[in-house]
């Protein structure tokens, strides 16, 4: 079996669902169920004996040691993290605690387990550390996309904490030989995405008749990756990447935030037109920018294509259509995640931006 951390979050739950749709190998899913973790994401697996969920913290060394000894996974895929840049600006401590110290404690528990494995199992073991392109910092408009050699220049507390965890994963390989592999993916989007992040926030706000908040001039560029394509890349990495290797994973879809909001509005205009016949684009509103806002991210994914034969299956157009359709078909999921805690965040983040989200 494999151990997945953070498997109740956006990418983790997509990964677990896709994994069990593709293969028989069981999954042990360790998640602390923070505000971002949602067991409803895993509902299709209820009663599936191949999925075992454990409510717990990656930083709980005794718990992780017990799980490793009991279940003897052949690999760890490490998603668990605090992941939202805006939250890292207003409260960095949780990011350092989980992303840096949590990853450190997890690496230590895994190292102790791995050290005691028989030689053959030791050689086959893998620890996939899921990181982000944001550790590379911000690109000038005409600069080449990030390669795996790009220097680390993190600008937000989130990206700085992820950079810290990447350095730990690297050092645990160099120093102790732990077979870690690090991946840097660009912005994911797709089903089960918590609506504090840009694309799902636009969809749920549009449908609720609320404003669509665009930070600053909206000319910031992100390289959007459909979550299912990220999951297929990680399966391939687990299968074929060498210990100590690093891969960038991107969708080859550089878009400005204004491109995104107009694409979302156009799809909603087609699939769920407003009662008054006007476009959802009327709800767009420019609000105060994010401090330290990175202007551009872009991924050069040629290494993973060349070495592992991975390429994204979705274009931005097909992936965004799937995503908008999924939100239209799952109003109960949206309603359930918009709890009191969610509303508090929306008030805190958008209350002072001169916009009303
Ligand atoms: P998410 O915030 O949706 O989910 C994170 C999950 O981790 C949640 O289920 C949460 O309960 C769990 N978690 C948090 N702290 C924990 C702890 N201490 N112990 C155990 N579980 C804990 O995040 P996501 O968007 O699914 O991102 C997953 C990973 O991918 C993260 O490491 C993130 O940095 C990375 N990543 C995400 C994106 C993106 O676009 N979403 C892009 C690049 C990289
Ligand atoms: P986000 O989904 O938070 O991802 P990240 O900051 O990790 O790239 O934001 C994506 C882009 O959208 C980013 O440039 C910030 C911008 N954005 C807005 O313009 N308005 C919003 O309300 C949010 C949440 C993000």
Image (tube, grey):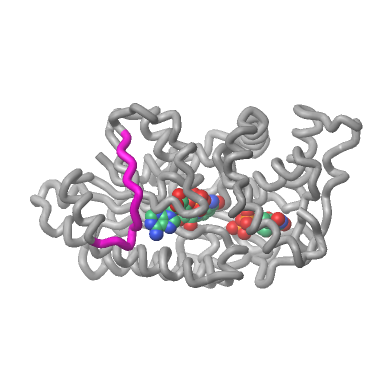
Which residue lies at the image location 57% right of the left edge and 37% below the top edge?
Answer: 191
Could you say which quadrant of the image residue 236 lies in? Answer: top left
Decide: is 113 above or below 72: below
Can you name the residue that lies furthest to the left here? 118
Q: Point out the image quarter for the N terminus.
A: top left
Which residue lies at the image location 76% right of the left edge and 40% below the top edge?
Answer: 208
Which residue lies at the image location 35% right of the left edge and 57% below the top edge?
Answer: 57
Asked if residue 130 lies left or right of residue 1, the reply is right
The answer to whether residue 331 is visible is: yes
Residue 291 position, x and y percent, is 68, 71
* Residues shaded magenta: 51-61
In front here: 285 or 128?
Answer: 285
In front here: 140 or 153?
Answer: 153
Could you say which quadrant of the image residue 109 lies in? Answer: bottom left
Asked if residue 63 lies left or right of residue 97, the reply is left
Decide: is 90 above or below 237: below
Asked if the magenta segment contains residue 160, the reply would be no
Residue 84 position, x and y percent, is 56, 59
Task: Count the marks.
Answer: 0
Residue 209 position, x and y percent, is 80, 42
Can you name the residue that lies furthest to the front here? 340
The answer to whether residue 301 is visible is: no
Residue 315 position, x and y percent, is 62, 36
Asked if residue 74 lies left or right of residue 226, the reply is left
Decide: is 81 above or below 24: below
Decide: is 289 above or below 222: below
């Amino acid at each position: 079996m494999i151990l997945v951390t953070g498997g109740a979050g956006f990418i983790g739950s997509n990964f677990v669902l896709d994994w069990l749709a593709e293969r028989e190998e069981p999954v042990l899913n360790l998640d602390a169920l923070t505000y971002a973790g949602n067991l409803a994401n895993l509902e299709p697996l209820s009663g599936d004996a191949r999925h075992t969920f454990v409510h717990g913290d990656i930083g709980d060394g005794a718990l992780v040691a017990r799980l490793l000894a009991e279940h003897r996974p052949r690999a760890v895929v490490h998603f668990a993290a605090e992941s939202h840049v805006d939250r890292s600006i207003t409260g960095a401590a949780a990011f350092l605690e989980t992303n840096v110290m949590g990853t450190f404690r997890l690496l230590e528990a895994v190292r102790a387990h791995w050290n005691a494995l028989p030689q053959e199992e030791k050689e086959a073991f893998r620890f996939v550390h899921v990181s982000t392109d944001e550790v590379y910092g911000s690109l000038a408009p005409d600069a080449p996309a990030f390669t795996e050699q790009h220097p680390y220049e993190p600008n937000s507390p989130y990206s700085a904490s992820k950079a810290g965890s990447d350095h730990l994963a690297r050092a645990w390989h160099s120093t102790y030989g732990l077979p870690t592999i690090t991946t840097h993916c660009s912005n994911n989007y797709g089903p089960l995405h918590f609506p504090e992040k840009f694309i799902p926030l636009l969809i749920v706000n549009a449908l609720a008749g609320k404003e669509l908040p665009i930070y600053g001039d909206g000319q910031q560029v992100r390289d959007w990756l459909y979550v299912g394509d990220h999951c297929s890349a990680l399966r391939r990495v687990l299968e074929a990447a060498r210990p100590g290797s690093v891969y960038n994973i991107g969708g080859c879809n550089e878009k400005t935030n204004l491109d995104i909001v107009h694409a979302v509005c156009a799809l909603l205009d087609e699939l769920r037109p407003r009662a008054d016949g006007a476009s959802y684009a009327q709800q767009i509103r420019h609000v105060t920018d994010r401090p330290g806002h990175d202007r551009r991210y872009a991924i050069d994914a040629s290494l993973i294509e060349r070495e592992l034969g991975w390429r994204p299956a979705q274009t931005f157009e097909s992936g965004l259509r799937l995503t908008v359709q999924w939100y239209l078909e799952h109003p109960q999921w949206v309603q359930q995640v918009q709890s009191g805690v969610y509303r508090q965040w929306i008030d805190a983040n958008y209350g002072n931006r001169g916009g009303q989200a």
